[in-house]
Image (cartoon, grey):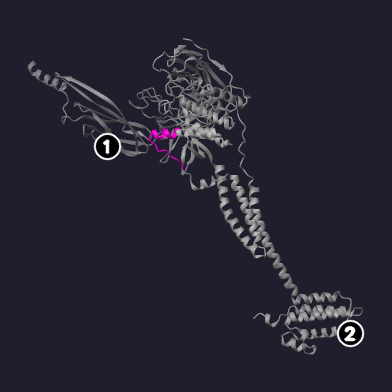
Amino acid sequence: MTVLLCALHRPPSAAEKPPDAFRRGVEALAEGRYEEAIDQLESLADRGVVHPDASYDRGLAYVLRVRAGAEREGDLGRAAAAFMEALALRPDDEEADHALGLVQAEVARRQARRGKDVLTARPTLGRVLCGLASERSWAASTVASSLVLSLGLVLRRRPRRPWRLAGMLLASIGLVAALVLVPLYLGARYLRLHTSPGVLVVREIYLGDEHIPEGARLELGECRGQLLHVRWGSHEGGIPAAAVRKLQVR
Amino acid sequence: MRAALAWPLVALLVLGFAPPARAQAGAPDLTATISAAEVQVGEPFTIELRAMTETGDSPHSPLLRAPPELAVSGPHISSQTRMQFGMGRSVVETGISARWQLVGNEEGSFTIPAPTVMVGPTTYQAGGPLHVRVIAASGAPFHVGAGSPLGPGSPFGGMGGSFPFPFPFPAGPGSLFDDDDDLLGPGTPEAHELALAAPRAAGVFLRSVADKRAAIVGEQVTLSHYLYYRVEFQMTDRREPALADFLRVPLLGNPGTDPPRNTIVGGQRYLVRLLDRVAVFPLRAGVLHTGALEAWFTSQRLGARALRTSDDLVIETREPPLADRPPGYRLGDVGRFRLTASVEPRATQAGGAVAVLVRIEGTGNVPNALKVPERTGVEWLDPERRSEVETRRGRVGGWRFFGYVVRLHQSGRINLGTVSLPFYDPDASAYGVAAAPLGFVAVQPPPPGPDAGAPAAGADAGAAGSDPFATIGEPRFALGRFEPVPDPELGQRALWALVVAGPLAALVGSIGQRAARGLRRRRSERAADPRALARRAVREALRAQDGPITATAVERAVHLAIEAATGLKSRAVLLGDLEAELGRRGLRAELALRARELLDRCASLRFEPLAAAPDAPAGRKPAAALAAAAGRLVAELAHERPQSEEPE
C-alpha cells in the first residue's frame, strides 16, 4: 500500500484578486473537475463578487455535476439560481436564458415523473401591477402626473373658457393618475426594501398545502431565527432558511 | 416411653417443615412494612411490599395511594424467589418486592392505605393501613435505615445501614455548619477558583461555567456543572440542559464521582462537587443558549423536591472571517487536522474501480464527511466510515477513516486529484488546508465486446442516451463587460418635493390670486366710503394753504360726513333747511347746527377770508381753524349712523 504524505499548505493569499479564483474555477470547469469549479466559483460569491459571467459559470458547474451523475439535492435549484442571477444582471443574456429554460424543464420533467403536478405560481394582483415597470419608471410617472395636475390647476384660473375647460380636464387626469401611480411607486419601493429574490434549493418543500418545486423563484421576507418568511405566488409562510438561496443581483 | 415421645416429635417435624397454610388457596403471600412510625418533616421513609405466589402468575402492578401531604416516589420493583423444602416436598415461590419512598411535607398523623398488587386479573391488598406521624424538624439527624437511598451505593452516602452522622457531616454545634473552619482538615482540597460572593440559593445550588463566552461555529466550548452544598440532601431527579444548538461530547468517564472540594461562598464554607463536564460545539452563528441544568433536592432544611437550576449560559457564536477563507470551507470545520490517503491499485481497466483510503485526524470538531475531488469520468461511491473520538487533556479529537470505491469510466492516465479539507484553527486565528494528493491511475481501455464503458450520465437523465442539457452553452473564460444595475434608490426628499411642489404652487397661486382680488375690492370699497372720503377731504383742507381751496375741501368733507351719518345728500338741500332736515333724520341738533355753521363759514371764507373765523386765536389763519373745526365735526359725525343702519 502506498501511503502518501499529507500536505498542509497555506490557503490562498488574502491579497489574491477574485479573477484568480474565477480563472481557477473556469479551468476546473473546462477539465470536468466540477467539485473544484463549484468551490472556486462559490468562493467568489461569498466574497461579494457579482458578475453575470461568474454566475453563469457557477450554474454550469452545478449542471455539470448533475450530468456527471453525482448530483446532490438542490443542484438544479442552485443552477437555476445562478442563471437567474446572470439574467438579472444582464437581461439580454440569451445563453443564460436558454440554460435556465433547460434547468426548469428538467425540474418539471422530474416533477411529472414523481407524479407531482407541475405548478406555476400566480402572484397577487398588487405584485403584478408593481412589477409592470421599474421603481424609477413609477417615480418618473408620478412626477409627470404631478406636472399635469399643476398645469391643469393653473389653466383653470384663466379667464377664457377654452383654457378653463382644458385646465379642468388636465387637472382631473393628473389627479387620477397621481392617485394611481403614487401607490404603485410606493409598492415597488416597499417590495425592493423589504423583500429580495431567492430560489428554492431543495427538492421540494411544502408551504401549507402547496408544494414548491426545486428552482422556484421566491420572494424572501424577514428571517426569524432559522425560519425565513417567503412568498410564492399568492402563498406565503415560513420555511428553513437553509432551503433557500438568495440571489445577488446588486 | 419412646413411643410416647415419638408422635409429638413427628408432629413437630411435620409442623416445622410443612409449608405454611394459606387461608385462601392461590392467594399471594403479602406483607407491607413501614420503615419508621415517626419521622421529621422532610425526613424520607419507605414502605415496602412483598408479594409472593406459588402459582405461575407473578404479581404485578403494585400500587400505593398516599395522602397528598406525603410526597411519594417509586416504586422500585425487584424480583424475589423463595424456596422451601420439607417432608419430601419443595415449594418455590416467586414474586416481587416493591419499595416506595415517602417524605412528609407537614406535621400530622397520617394513615396510609395498605398497598395493593395484582395477580392475574385479581387485586389484593397487603393487610391493614399503615400509620406514620410526622413531627416538626428538630435538627436531629435523620435515621438512615437499611434500604435507604442514602445507603450503600449512593454517591452522596456511602456508609450504608444506620449511622449516626448524616451525610456529609453532622449538623449542630461543632459541625461543619457551625462555621468553625478549623474542623475542616487539610485533606479536603481548596477550590479558590470556585469561590463566590454570594450563594445562588439556600443550602444547595447549582452552577454552570463555560470556558469561553464567544466562539466560532464548530469551536469547542467546555461546560462544567458544579454542585455547591452545605446541608444534607438527596438529589431525587435531574434534567440535563437542552443544548439545542450544540453538538455535545462528554468529557468525563464517570461524572459525579470526583471527590468534593471546599470553597467560600458569601463568607461561608461550602463543599463543591463537579457533577459533569462536557464539550459542546456550536452548530450555527448567533446568540446561543445552553439551557440550564435542573435538579430536585429533598432535604430536612429544603423540604421535599426543592428545585435548583444552574446558569443558562449565553455563547455568542460567529462565523470565521470571510477574508482568506479557502474555497470549499464548510462551516463547523474548526480545529487542527491532518489528512493521509492511499490509492490501491494504481492500474485498472475502464469501468473498473480502485480503493481510496483517507484518514483525518486531529483535535477539534473532526468532520464526519469529506469533499472528494469529483470529476467527469470518475465516480466516487459512498464511503465506508470508521471513527474514534477521544478526549485529550480536555480537548476533543480523534480520527475518522473513509474508505471509498472509485469507478473510473475513462481510459488513460487519470489524475484523481487532491482530497482537501479546509479548516479554521481558532488557536492560530487562521485558516488551514489539510490536503492529500491522490496521484494518477493508469486506466486501460475496455476489452473489445459489449460496451462496458461509462454508465448513463446522471441518475435522472431521462431516456437512455438523451442528455437534457446537451444544448447548454460553453463556459465563459473571461469576465465580460456589463453595466451594473444602478441603485434604484431615489432621493426621497427631492422626489416628493418634485411631486408636491407643482400642485402646491398652483394651489397657492390660485389662493393668492383670490386673496389679492378680495383685497383690491375691499380697498376700493373702502376708498368709496363717504366717511373715508370725508376724512380725506379734511386732510386736504388741513394741507391747503389757500382759503378758497380750504373752504371747498371743508365743504366737501362736511357734506360727505353728513351723507355717511344720515344718508342725506346735503348738497341738494338749501342751507336754511339743512338743520331741520338733519333733525328729521335723527341727527342731534347740536351737530346739525355746527354743520350748518361750518358750511356758512366756508361760503364766507371763499368770498371773505379774513372775516370767516371770528373765534380764531390771534395769529392763526382762519382757513386752518376752519379745517380743524371740520375735522372735529367729521370725527363726531363718523359715530353717527343713518337711521336705516340703526340696530333694532
- Name the residue that disc number 2 marks: B607
Q: Position of residue B178 (x, y in %)?
A: 48, 29
Disc 2: host chain? B
Q: Is residue B317 magenta?
A: no
Quarter of the picture containing the C terminus of chain B is bottom right
Image quadrant holding the N terminus of chain B, namely top left
Q: Give the answer, above or below, for where B417 lies relative to A164.
A: above
Q: How many marks?
A: 2
- Tag 2's secondary structure? helix
Q: Nearer the viewer, mark 1 or mark 2?
A: 2
Q: Which of disc 2 and disc 1 is earlier in sequence?
A: 1
Magenta span = A106-121
- Quick one: label 1, few (<14), some, or many (20+) residues within 10 Å? some
Q: Position of residue B152 (x, y in %)?
A: 36, 23
**Where is residue A128 shown, x and y percent of the image?**
51, 46
Disc number at residue B113? 1
What residue occupies the far front of the structure in this picture? B449
What type is the residue that disc 2 sits on? Answer: Phe
Chain of the residue under the numbered disc 1 shown in the image: B
Distance, label 1 to label 2, CA atoms, is 143 Å
Residue B598 showing in the rendered view: yes
Mark 2, other Cα within 10 Å: few <14 / some 14–19 / many ≥20 = some
Residue B227 seen: no
